[in-house]
Image (spheres, rainbow, N blue to C red):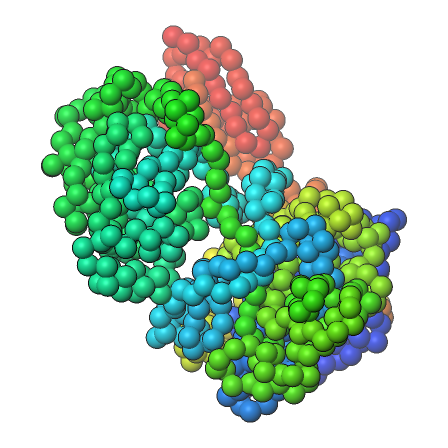
Amino acid sequence: MAEQTTTSAGTASGYDPQKIEAKWQKRWAEERMFESEADPSKPKYYVLEMLPYPSGTMHMGHMRNYAIGDVVARVKRMRGFNVLHPMGWDAFGLPAENAAIKNKTHPRIWTNHNIAQFQRVLRRFGFSYDWRREISTCEPGYYRWNQWFFLRMLERGLAYRKKSLVNWCPKCQTVLANEQVINGGFCWRHEDTRVESREIEQWFLRTTTYSDQLLDDLKQLEGGWPERVILMQKNWIGKSQGAKVKFAVAGAAGAGPIEIFTTRIDTIYGATAVILAPAHPLAAKLLEGSPAPAEAEARLAKMRQTSVKTEDLATMEKEGFFTGRYAVNPFNDEKIPIWVGNFVLMEYGTGAIMAVPAHDQRDLEFCKKYKLSVRVVIQPLVGEELSGEKLETAFDEHLHGKLVNSGPFNGLSPEEAIAKMTAFAEQKGCGRGETIYRLRDWGISRQRYWGTPIPVVYCAKDGMLPVPDKDLPVVLPPNPKLTGEGQSPLASTPEFVNTTCPKCGGPARRETDTMDTFVDSSWYFYRYCDPHNDKAPFDSAKVSYWFPIDQYIGGITHAILHLLYSRFWCKVMRDLGLVKHDEPIARLFTQGMVQKGGVAMSKSRGNVVGAEEMAQKYGADTGRLYTLFAAPPEKDLEWSEESIEGSWRFLNRVYRLIERHSQAVRGVKGGKFDAAAASRKEKALLRKVHQTLRRVTSDFESRWHFNSAIALIMELTNDVYAQEPLEQGVRPEVRKEVLELLTLMLAPMTPHLAEELWEMLGHGEGMGKVSWPTFNQELAREDEVEIVVQVSGRVRGRVKVSAGAGEEEVVKLALAEAGVAHHADGKRIVKKIFVRDKLLNLVVSG
């Protein structure tokens, strides 16, 4: 029977995705299909995609993330789970404020317009969200609880204020996190603007209080989180065990000592300089006696204005200058020069290092550039003896060396020396063993309007005071003056700044910094459990039912900050008695990017494919199917218009197939047939559909190989077409079984079409209460299997036999194989090892 062809320009044989999708979305909404409540009598499953930032228009790069999550949610519902699948908006942030300035509108208007557009698109794609639970982080009903959490942390000493060096973008006029400084010192949003370092008063959350827990509890995530993400978090926390050692400053009264941290105290005899971070508090004081103080101070000021990221240290150009001062090595009393270097960071260790160029590559690059001496103090156990003058690469393999040029410690292994030299430093009073962390406290202050106001006030009489809980939320003023320049817009809004002291009743001024938007996203998934609670952030009993999140889905770009801050927030809430678990997320999946032209889809690159336009042209189900089929979900996907046409044509084929047979099977009861009496054609169809179901079930449940599941369903569809005309030799009840299973397998990925096909097959009720089908083991068995044949443990051939064939039959066929016979003829078979349908091993002798 000839097939009718279709293109994206129109529909054929009745498949009208626009009509079908609108019909079923309306039905789902009316029947409140995706709403869920905590129910201890049912197994729960909490699946969540990272909430989007509503900026611009939604494109197909966004859709992949949500399509993956929706497949998981729908499969779990069909498996009998009580599924929580919510959606909300990460609505605060600087881009909205900048867009408001550019477009001369209010950030709320711009944000809410984008939220409406995003929600329309997500609904258009039929994602199965419980929209009753929708949150928007820019609403006072949400950010009130940001402020409440801040006050609880303030009470416990976890929130505090101090002067700190920060990354400052002169164009954004705000503080940037380290991760927002890119390309060796430029702003992530203004890539032509160099980031500066400034010292200003900032609010911090004491994440370092939880350093050990954040590190140790990663063990709970093994097997559920990608190893790559766990490693990234370990490295970010950065636990280092070593020693702090004090170097006196020679001839500088009141200017010392300089304390350094090192993990390699065993190399201290190889120190040929002490190098300070530009921000080190002693740096400016040491310049007072330098030969050219004005020139040195200008260089220091320039270095302090330049922001440096840790990940750039290995590749950046090392620069520095001599202070004119010397430090005294406490182990050998040697005077070594004190330098300032751009590759030493104040936020790691003590902000000062001892440079050991022979055994640290960065130190070697710096010292060779400035002609500082290189002294080898560890020689390799094997190979050529190292010379400092000839060294091009630092020798840092301390596990394979012994100490030299190290006084009384010569001949020791580095491990022995570390223990003995640390003890020596402690005995002498010039050092001590210490563990430090790369993790720093979280600076949450931002000098912008569109964020959560920090709930404290300043009174001339009573000092800094928290806003009382009864006065929360501290609401943003409705009409700020937004210019993008100078101080925070809140600071120039008198009706916001001027307030009353909650203690004395006198005049006071409000804090004008707002919170980092990572605060909003650090706990939002708890609010989904109880989004309308106006008495508490959430009901702990509801959270206890739904948590931890069973599956969280999002990009690898959030592997550090968002996930680390969320883990920190969870531990704080646990210590507040709000939750009982240590970790909020049991399983994490990081999906690949959708690319076009070899780069990720982005409005700024002009390579986006609009989601609404795509749905209008092909239908939402086609877009869903394509994003799931074109690549494994963890891999990047290259957009192809030709390939999406292929997905469209496939759905048309499925629709025509079921439309052709629907009248014949509508009134037939499925599953009521005698499989033993099946014809050849029926056996072939039943075997194929149950084998496909078995493999698709595995792909959904254990591997998330959605692309291979779709390929299997396409193959099944082709096989069914190959058996046409089905009216000849296939009973209606068998046809119904095959077509129903095909429809059910498609349901999680193309839900609108599946609902329509299900109705066409005679089901008056929708698929909301339909369970995932179970494959029939007997029907799914292969007719023939290939057996590997070994002779004395070595593969010598393969034979095809009927599935379930016994040992005697397989041995007979195996010995007839030339490769097996060659190695078995004339020899005695002393043992037969037989694994049905898989393996035969003939152990021979002689």
Image quadrant of residue 402? Answer: top left
* Viewer-closest of 97 and 292: 292
729 displayed left or right of 817: right
* Viewer-closest of 540 and 414: 414
Name the spot of residue 96 as percent of width and height, x first.
56, 79
682 displayed left or right of 234: right
Q: Is residue 614 visible?
A: no
Give the position of the N terminus as an image quadrant. bottom right
* Viewer-closest of 619 and 379: 379
365 displayed left or right of 499: left
Q: Residue furthest front?
A: 253
Name the spot of residue 175 as percent of width and height, x first.
49, 68
Name the spot of residue 399 as percent of width and height, x first.
32, 26
Count of marks placed on residues: 0
The residue that appears at 15% across and 34% down in the rendered structure is: 388
Name the spot of residue 478 as percent of width and height, x first.
68, 85
Name above or below for residue 78 compared with residue 60. above
* Viewer-closest of 729 and 70: 70
Name above or below for residue 138 compared with residue 436. below
Image quadrant of residue 224? Answer: top right
Q: Residue furthest left?
A: 390
The residue that appears at 35% across and 46% down in the rendered structure is: 255
The residue that appears at 80% across and 59% down in the rendered structure is: 538
Image quadrant of residue 780? Answer: top right
Q: Is residue 470 visible?
A: yes
The residue that appears at 16% across and 39% down in the rendered structure is: 373
Q: Residue furthest bottom?
A: 104
Give the position of the C terminus as an image quadrant. top left
